[in-house]
Amino acid sequence: MEILVTLPLDEAGKARFAAAAPGHRLHFVEKDAVTPALLESAQAILGNLADPAQLRHCKELRWLQLDSAGTDGYCAPDLLPEGAVLTNTTGAFGACIAEWLLAALLALWRRLPEYAENQKNCRWQRLGPVRTLAGSTVLVLGFGDLGRNFARRAHLLGARVLAVRRRPGEKPDWLEALGGAEMLEEWLPLADAVVLCLPANASTRHMLSAGRIALLKKDAVVLNAGRGSAVDTEALCRALYDGRIGGAALDVTDPEPLPPEHPLWHAPNTILTPHVSGLLSQPENFEKAAGICVENLRRFLAGQPLVNQVDRSTGYAD
């Protein structure tokens, strides 16, 4: 079997993958160096491509294993050959991204961006009251690996946590409430912080719309570490400049990368990072993602069910 591997592996990593596929031909190629010829013959691909549209070269593909949890672009209709299975690495990044969310939320509530600005200007000035997670109400949109990891940590620090998910599920005892999107209008006005942990698909686009942003408290903050398309960026920008909400922390934006001239760069009390909260280059994340890939490779060759199979109509892993 012809197997294309685009993960950035060292020699030990390559040996680990090869050991899971004895007797099969593995091509270890960086994603930017993948050629149409390699794609035409590949029956399995492990790792993302430079551009999902390259999959149109595939003739024999039976399985694509992404090295990301996000499936943006890979679920386009008729992109994968008929019958090909798509899997991702859900479970590899949740804990790491949850730490970014916690750091950003605490930075906003302890006014660290404002104090950093004062430091630049050599200004010794106390800015007044700060907020804590203890006793706050946090609304989490998306209760998969990322949302659950963050919600659990916020609860342990004393927050009352509400969570919205796309389909019913068992509510953990520590969670205050779990509901569907129909609860948003009721819960948004209660939230001190709204945390988005959503993938990009038609159902999540602008889930935090202009109308829903208008429901937020004047001092509420918005954090997004899922996908930028879940937020109406222009509406969020207006709310920040008008002082209608308390701040934002965004690791993802729409558009992305954010153009240098975009007003969001200079929005009041806003933290922006360039989609770095869960990088594959972080050793812990890479080890988890590689582990999922190797296990699925073993399962694929043994004819066993694969973990993290993606429903291409939603972009979610089952």
Image: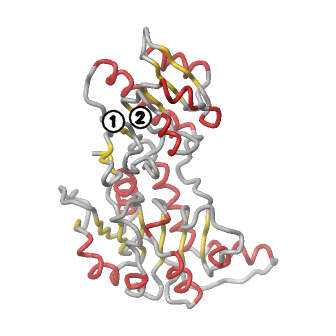
Disc 1 to disc 2, C-alpha distance? 6 Å
Residue 85 horizontal/vertical position (percent): 33, 36
Element type where label 2 sits in the image:
strand
Residue 135 image-quadrant placement = bottom left
Q: Residue at x 55, y 66 (%)?
A: 253
Cβ atoms under marks 1 and 2 closer than 8 Å: yes
Residue corresponding to mark 1: 85
Q: In this rendering, would 50 be left or right of 223? A: right
Q: Nearer the viewer, residue 231 or 163?
A: 231
Residue drawn at (46%, 46%) of the image: 93
The residue to which callout 2 is attached is 64
Q: Give 252 or 126, whichever is nearer the viewer.
A: 252
Does 220 appear above or below 305?
below
**Which residue reaches farthest right?**
122
State the image quarter where residue 167 is shown.
bottom left
Amino acid type for the residue under numbered disc 2: Leu
Q: Which mark is residue 119?
A: none
Residue at screen point 41% across, 27% down:
60
Which picture quadrant has residue 261? bottom right
Vertical arrangement, residue 88 with respect to residue 294, above or below: below
Query: Left or right: 153 with respect to 39?
Result: left
x, y percent for residue 52:
50, 45
Q: Is residue 180 left or right of residue 77?
A: left
In what element is the residue under mark 1? Answer: strand
Looking at the picture, how far across and down is residue 2, in whole percent?
46, 19
Q: Is residue 195 left or right of residue 143?
A: right
Tell me residue 21's x, y (percent).
42, 15
Q: Residues within 10 Å of mark 2 (few under 14, many from 20)?
A: many
Residue type indicated by callout 1: Val
